[in-house]
Structure formats: C-alpha cells, structure tokens
Amino acid sequence: MDNNFPADHAPIKLYRNPLSGHCHRVELMLSLLGLPYENIDLDMANGAHKSPEYLKISPFGQVPAIDDNGYTMSDSNAIITYLVKRYSGNDAWLPEEPAQAAEVQRWLSVAAGEIMYGPCTVRLVKLFGMDLDYSTAEAITHKLFSVLEKTLTERSFLVGNQITLADIAGYSYISHVPEGGVSLDPYPAIKAWLARIEAQPKFVGMKRSKDLTK
C-alpha cells in the first residue's frame, strides 16, 4: 500500500451515518489513501451518538469520528487532515506552498460554511424533512455553484490541476445535491469535476437515497 500505515495496527474505526456527506468525505479519504478501515454505523435514531461511550470519542456527539488504534478524533475536516498528515507521503493532498495551502484551507472553510448551509441543507429538508429554510439554502447553493462553475472552468480541481483535500471536502454533498431538489445540469464544469474525482483510483461512492429521482 502507498501509505505509512503500520502492518501490525488494526483497521481504523470510522463511526458514521451512511447517508451523511460528512462521514462519506472521511470514508473517501480513507479509501483513496488505501488505509484499512472498518465502518461502524451508529443507531442515531435511538441515541447511540449520545451514549457515554461514544461521547468519549466524539465529545459533541457528532459523526463522523475515528478511532485510530487508540487515537480518537471527530470533525470530518479535522479527520481528513489528520489522515493525510499521518499516513500520506504525498504533499499534494495538503500542499506546503503558502498560497496553495491557504487555498485548501479556504475551501475547507467553504465546506463547513456554504456547502453545509447550501447543498447539505437542501438535502436535509428534502430527504429527512428537517424544519430548515429551504429557499435560503437553495439560494446559497446556486450562489456557491456559480463560483464553483467559474473556478472549475479555469482549472481541473479546486486548487490547481491536482486533487487536494479541498476536493474531498467538497465532493459528497455537491454530488448528492439532486437529492435536495437542485439539478446539476446547468453546471457542466462542476459535473466534469465530480467525474474527475470519481475516476480516482480507489474511489468509493456514498450511499444514495432510494428517493433519488435525478
């Protein structure tokens, strides 16, 4: 394997909800790095994420979280950063060059901001019936997509022409935004970017809802 994972270590445990884009970005990173991992699906409907045992791993009771042979971490963007810094010998995932490093960080912030309040939220409303402001989330989504479309017309990935953590953080909710009632058809550059990510060796997809119609 092209990573620094010790041969005598157990697989990394990924605590997740299989329909969560936050969880999928971690699973995608694990797979792309060729790291052995074990998915542990939490029964969140019955409060498994609030159990005392799980709160020791994820103090805010959120998914995803990992247990890497005794080292625990929650927050999807923190986890993918840890995995790359700990196990990848390829600096391209998180460049050292200052401007590129800053761009990756900016897109990680977008993943926690506009992507969370746009593509993630429209999906929460349509799939899970959450009482959130759909119109605002839809507007945020289209504003985000207009920026992404321009960016991805000029380059292959979010930070230059090589895949980075920025792309992993952005992929899951954007690729599943049709589940939230937003079509990707007006955004050909975004669709081409998604296809480039899906063409990566060891790519693993996210479970799609049975309600997907597009």
Image: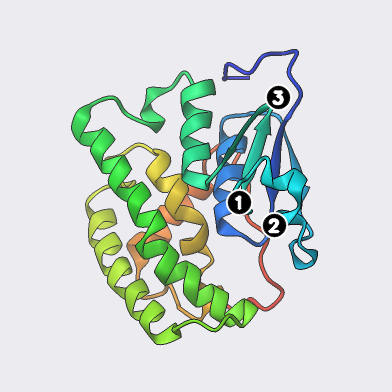
Q: Nearer the viewer, residue 106 or 175?
A: 106
Color encoding of the figure: rainbow
Give the percent coordinates (x, y) of residue 64: 61, 49
Which sits earlier in the primary sequence, circle 3 or circle 1?
A: 1
Graded by Cα atoms within 10 Å as few (under 14), some (14 to 19) or many (20 or more), the crowding at tag 2 reads some
Determine the secondary structure under disc 3. Answer: loop
Which sits earlier in the primary sequence, circle 2 or circle 3?
A: 2
Q: Nearer the viewer, mark 3 or mark 1?
A: 3
Determine the secondary structure under disc 1. Answer: helix
Residue sitting farthest toward the left: 99
Q: CA distance from mark 1 to mark 2?
A: 7 Å
Tell me whether circle 2 and circle 3 mark residues in contact (CB < 8 Å).
no
Disc on res. 23: 1
Q: CA distance from mark 2 to mark 3?
A: 22 Å
Graded by Cα atoms within 10 Å as few (under 14), some (14 to 19) or many (20 or more), the crowding at tag 3 reads few
Give the percent coordinates (x, y) of residue 35: 64, 28
Give the percent coordinates (x, y) of residue 20: 61, 60
Q: CA distance from mark 3 to mark 1?
A: 19 Å
Residue 111 in view: yes
Query: Which residue in the structure is indicated by mark 2?
Result: 18
Tell me whether circle 1 and circle 2 mark residues in contact (CB < 8 Å).
yes
Residue drawn 37% across and 48% down?
Answer: 108
Query: Which residue in the structure is indicated by mark 3?
Result: 69
Q: Nearer the viewer, residue 42 or 170?
A: 42
Give the percent coordinates (x, y) of residue 48: 77, 56
Quarter of the view holding residue 149: bottom left
Tell me whether circle 3 and circle 1 mark residues in contact (CB < 8 Å).
no
Which sits earlier in the primary sequence, circle 1 or circle 2?
A: 2
Quarter of the view holding residue 42: bottom right
